């Protein structure tokens, strides 16, 4: 019998290569058919190991969901960027590799990010998701997020709606 260690922990710069691989796989599968191919390719290739290493060295807060020696997913979070929205914190990204989705790990990663934000005084939070990313919007609704704002983002020649979900303090 073998034992697999499952943990959520803070990322370090030495995790950069593993996070980049998880990001690459999760983004390609989540956004294929939503974000135009060449734009998706640019978004993914921009975020290689060097980008993650730099972000972590500059103090970005990234939590990893580690399954054995695999980074199954990650969440990054910090201060809310949208000044017009009255929430303290924001989860910028929350992504699991496809084979780790639907097993309750997303909820655990979300709760860990929320706890981490609350510990530094950010008790309310917001998350943006593309409206066309239905699994994500359903996930945030299931976690009690309330849609509070809409905006849009342009990827090449395609403009996509996005929704902000919020959790009050
Ligand atoms: C979105 C994501 C983080 C959710 O994580 P997950 O581990 O798959 O979700 P969980 O298993 O923790 O589900 C938590 C709850 O959300 C619900 N949920 C999750 N996905 C759902 C879906 N597609 N439709 C309806 N409900 C869903 C679950 O039923 C569960 O609710 P319950 O506990 O009341 O049964 C994950 O699927 C993922 O990484 N997707 C691709 C990347 C992505 O789109 N990230 C978000 C970008 S904004």
Image (cartoon, rainbow, N blue to C red):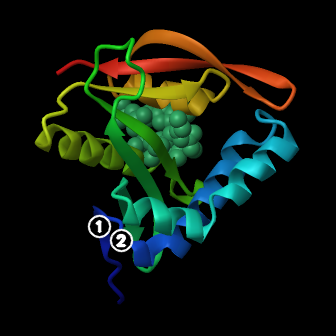
For label 2, the residue is 12
Q: Quadrant of residue 46?
A: bottom right
- The tag earlier along the polypeptide, 1 or 2, is 1
Q: Is mark 1 on a helix, strand or loop?
A: strand
Relative to residue 162, is residue 109 drawn left or right?
A: left
**Mark 1 crowd level (few <14, some 14–19, many ≥20, 10 Å Cα):** some
Quick one: 46 or 132, which is closer to the camera? 46
For label 1, the residue is 7
Image quadrant occupied by the C terminus = top left
x, y percent for residue 54 = 48, 65
Mark 1 against mark 2, which lies toward the viewer? Answer: 2
Residue 12 visible in the picture: yes
Q: In which quarter of the image is residue 147?
A: top left
Image quadrant occupied by the N terminus = bottom left
Give yes or no for contact between labels 1 and 2 (Cβ–Cβ under 8 Å): no
Residue 91, placed above or below residue 96: above
Residue 26, placed above or below residue 1: above
x, y percent for residue 158 = 82, 24
* Residue drawn where x is 32% and y is 83% of the image: 3
> Distance between the Cα atoms at labels 1 and 2?
14 Å
Quick one: 42 or 28, which is closer to the camera? 42
Q: Which residue lies furthest to the bottom in this view?
A: 1
Q: What element carries label 2?
A: loop
Number of the label disc, if any, that sits on residue 100: none
**Mark 2 crowd level (few <14, some 14–19, many ≥20, 10 Å Cα):** some
Q: Quadrant of residue 9?
A: bottom left
């Amino acid at each position: 019998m073998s034992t697999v260690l499952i943990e959520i922990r803070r990322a370090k710069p030495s995790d950069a290569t593993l996070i980049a691989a998880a990001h690459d796989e999760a983004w390609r599968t989540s956004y294929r058919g939503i974000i135009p191919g060449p734009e998706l390719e640019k978004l993914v290739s921009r975020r290689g190991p060097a980008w993650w290493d730099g972000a972590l060295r500059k103090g970005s807060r990234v939590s990893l969901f580690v399954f054995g020696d695999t980074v199954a997913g990650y969440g990054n979070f910090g201060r809310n960027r949208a000044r017009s929205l009255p929430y303290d914190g924001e989860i910028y990204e929350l992504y699991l590799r496809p084979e780790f989705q639907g097993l309750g790990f997303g909820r655990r990663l979300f709760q860990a990010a929320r706890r981490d934000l609350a510990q530094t005084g950010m008790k309310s939070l917001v998350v943006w998701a593309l409206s066309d990313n239905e699994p994500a919007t359903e996930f945030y609704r299931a976690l009690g997020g309330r849609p509070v704002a809409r905006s849009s983002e342009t990827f090449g020649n395609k403009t996509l709606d996005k929704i902000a979900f919020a959790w009050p303090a």
